[in-house]
Image (cartoon, rainbow, N blue to C red):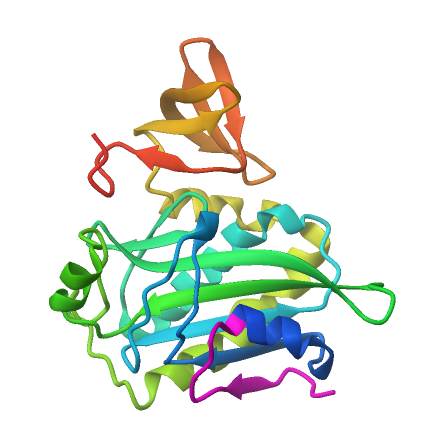
Amino acid sequence: MSLNEVRRLPACGSTNSYAKAHIEEFGPVAAVYTTDQTEGRGRLGRRWVNAAGQALYYTAILKVPMVQPGALPLFASLAVREQLRLRYGVDCAIKWPNDLLLGGKKLAGILCEAVNYGAGGEGRAYLCGVGLNLAQPQSYFDKAGLPYGTSLALQGAKVDLDADPAWLAEGLTDFGFDRALYTFGPEGFAPYRAAYTAACVNLGRRVSFAQAGGVGEGVAAAIDEEGRLVVRTGGGEERVFTGEVSVSGIYGHV
């Protein structure tokens, strides 16, 4: 078993799938990454379009206790946001719960899931998969039918495709997750709530969200202590924790 290993893969189907298949090889905090992922997927089963050599596909493997694992996607979005700030000097916004936006367009998506491992399934781990657009040209997004997607290069960042994937993977693993988990693991989302609130693009905007029996609408007012989106509707307050949320003025939503 390797402790806090960051494993580079020349190519793979999915870094999350690879992590599951090899999970017992890794220590408490580890990661795998590639720049060529052929079978990725996004939230709600959406396919992540591969951009070989032009994007970072990364999965953190976390075998540490967490008092609030449901807030892991929000914590992960802050971890990615900070590493992008350090490397490129960019200030990304967050679309609840975990899309990173730059210039009003989607730069990165995050998919977190819990897995059991071991002969009797007694082990518990959490995976955070990150798809980060580094240097795709506009033609990539046009061909893929992603009008609201962007890359760091398109937003004016100086991207080094030889050095940046390894730097980002190492930084995310050592600082974004490992050291920060000493706080997030036992304390949960509360210490990160203010930073997340400051970066969240949903707040103060009209949003629509899935709910039992249809679609709810209102104004996003706050992020609560559990990471839920607090929406003020005509009937009071709704606390949204799962599902798709559309935000007025983001991704073409009116």
Image label count: 0
- Looking at the picture, how far across and down is residue 174, in whole percent? 56, 77
Residue sitting farthest toward the top: 235
Q: In this picture, is 211 found above or below 81?
A: above
Percent position (x, y) of residue 28? 71, 74
- Left or right relative to 149: residue 55: right
- Of 101 and 34, nearer the camera is 34
In percent of width and height, residue 185 lies at 69, 58
As drawn, is 218 to the left or to the right of 74?
left
Residue drawn 43% across the image and 69% down it: 39
Residue nearest the observer in this picture, 196 or 21: 21
Q: Who's the residue at 43% across and 19% down the image? A: 232
Above or below: residue 171 compared with residue 10: above
- Quarter the C terminus occupies: top left
Identify the residue at image location x=47%, y=75%.
13
Determine the image quadrant of residue 152: bottom left
x, y percent for residue 5: 61, 85
- Which part of the image, by quadrant, shows the N terminus? bottom right
Task: Find the magenta span and give its range.
Answer: 1-15
Please give left or right for residue 156 compared with residue 29 in the image. left
Q: Is residue 12 magenta?
A: yes
**Secondary structure mainly formed by the magenta segment:** loop
Q: Is residue 136 magenta?
A: no
Q: Image height check: is 98 above or below 87?
A: above
Question: In this rendering, is residue 107 above or below 22?
Answer: above
What's the residue at 33%, 35% (across, down)?
246
